[in-house]
Image (tube, helix red, strand yellow):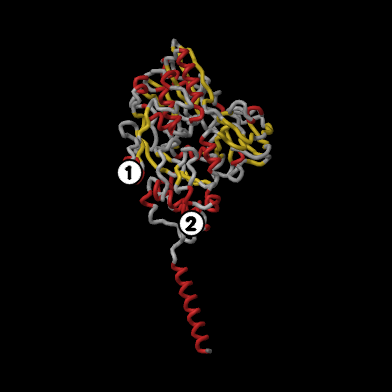
Amino acid sequence: MKKLSVLLTIITLLFSLLTISCEKDKPIDPKSQALLVSQFVYDGMSNFYLWADEVTNKKPKATDVDPEKYFYSILNATDTKHGWSWITDDVDDLLKGFQGESTDAFGFQPLPLYTDEARTTIVGFIRYVYPETPAAEAGLKRGEVIIKINGKTLNNNNYMGLFGANSETTFTVLDQKFENPREVKVTPAKQLNTDPVLYSNVYEIEGKKIGYLFYTGFIENYNNSLYRVFSEFKTAGITDLVLDLRYNPGGGISAATYLASLIAPQANVSNKDPFTIMSYNQYVNKAFDDNKWDRKDYLGDYDNTKYQNPLTANLNLNKVYVIATGSSASASELLTFCLKPYMQVEHIGEKTSGKYTASWTIHAYDNFEGRVQPVYKESSLSATEKNKLKNWAMQPIVGRYTDKNNKDFIATNGLIPDHAIKTQEYNTETWKPIGDVNDYLFAKAISLITGKPYQTALRSSDDKQFKDAGLYPQIESVTRQAVIIDNPKLLPPLK
């Protein structure tokens, strides 16, 4: 009996050791709680990412429990260098941003600049203020300079306070000449909707009727605002169009196509000629081909359940003057570049940002009414898994765009202006109100249209040596990096 007891003990011990060994060698469960989000990152990126072939051998390891860190570790080198792809744990906020909604916002767009070589001290130039916002009501104006937030000098630790806050904020503000400091209290709006059609007007100069539009972002929700302005231009009988995209970081391809359909020659819009062509990775391209889906976006295509036919407000011009600078990116560049096969585009300003890529939003299981690519079937996930994944989303680079002739501007890494103008954006002393005919960029367009000599205010002899800090709120960073494919053809979720 004693021998039998010892034998049973040995067998039990051996079985336990064998079980432990097997568990140690057992592959990682893709749905394990610790790695659930990282596995979602891998599954989405290894299928839809433009450089998916580089990701397939980078499956998450047991130590990859931080999904954000893991996401950035598997990116293509060029992507990493430029900071194109994004991940977020607040998908709702991301999608609201694409629709022109912001939370805890003031309603002005600042340009953060470093004031010193050490890049420690920052000032915020106010580029523009949206009407009927807390910033407008507090009296903030274009060209003013913010130097402090709540009594503290702006720096790398508190600059985000320029973009929004959850409580009343006190800004120390200088005028355009960097004089007369004053304290301005602004209470942010919990939710703010800002129309990117910020300013439009018709000018009669030297026998020309010039339509001018200042457009701040490609947001489809405001296509009707574009339609209204172009209808006014058409009724006024404008002879020339100036489109000011100097601060436009980009946005969605739907708005870009709609705006192009208002500008391009009427015959091309009526014929629904190709506007731009997308190319994806091998897997996505094959899925498009298998489903006989088109990778082109067409002039004249729009959502007729929400918006009016752009053809009825089309100006039927053969030339457009586009003001674009280094702050003009992604969809701004797509619009400017892809109109060129159809009409004369006179680019005034600077070389643009150089964003020739496209991205779409990826979620674990929710397609958000057709706007987002899901990775898994919702029915394949438990309630616990869905809860853990529900807030996460990726905004990776999935494609590149070209014009209708398959041409791109990768080689020049940005659009080269036809009429290069030395920037005055780093010194507010020469800034004019938006739409002012003496503005240094608008004045050049007027000169080209009318033949009048080009004259603007001279730069200050005491020119301030500021450097662009390259600091943006998240939604602007995302739209700057790539054209947002906001009307994606949804591929089937993974099995």
Q: Specify few, some or many for label 2: CA neighbours under 10 Å numbering under 14, 14-19, or 20 or more.
A: some
For this rendering, which residue is in front, 80 or 366? 366
Residue on which disc 2 sits? 31
Q: Residue furthest bottom?
A: 2
Q: Residue furthest top?
A: 207
Q: Residue furthest front?
A: 1
Q: Which quadrant would residue 484 be assigned to in this image?
A: top left
Q: Residue at point 55% right, 53% down?
A: 384
Decide if residue 494 is in sight here. yes
The disc placed on residue 286 is: 1
Does residue 161 sit above or below 5 in this rendering?
above
**Residue 279: percent from left, percent from top:** 35, 39
Q: Residue at point 45% right, 11% down?
A: 206
Q: Which quadrant would residue 113 be assigned to in this image?
A: top right
Q: Specify few, some or many for label 1: CA neighbours under 10 Å numbering under 14, 14-19, or 20 or more.
A: few
Q: CA distance from mark 2 to mark 1?
A: 28 Å
For this rendering, which residue is in front, 419 or 264? 264
Pick whichever of labels 2 and 1 is earlier in the sequence.
Answer: 2
For this rendering, which residue is in front, 248 or 31? 31
**Residue 296: percent from left, percent from top:** 35, 33
| Left or right, residue 286 beside residue 463 | left
The disc placed on residue 134 is: none
Decide if residue 467 is in sight here. no
**Residue 288: percent from left, percent from top:** 34, 40
Which amino acid type corresponds to the residue marked 2 in the rendered image?
Lys
Give the secondary structure at mark 1. helix
**Residue 307: percent from left, percent from top:** 47, 25
Which amino acid type corresponds to the residue marked 1 in the rendered image?
Lys
For this rendering, which residue is in front, 36 or 75? 36
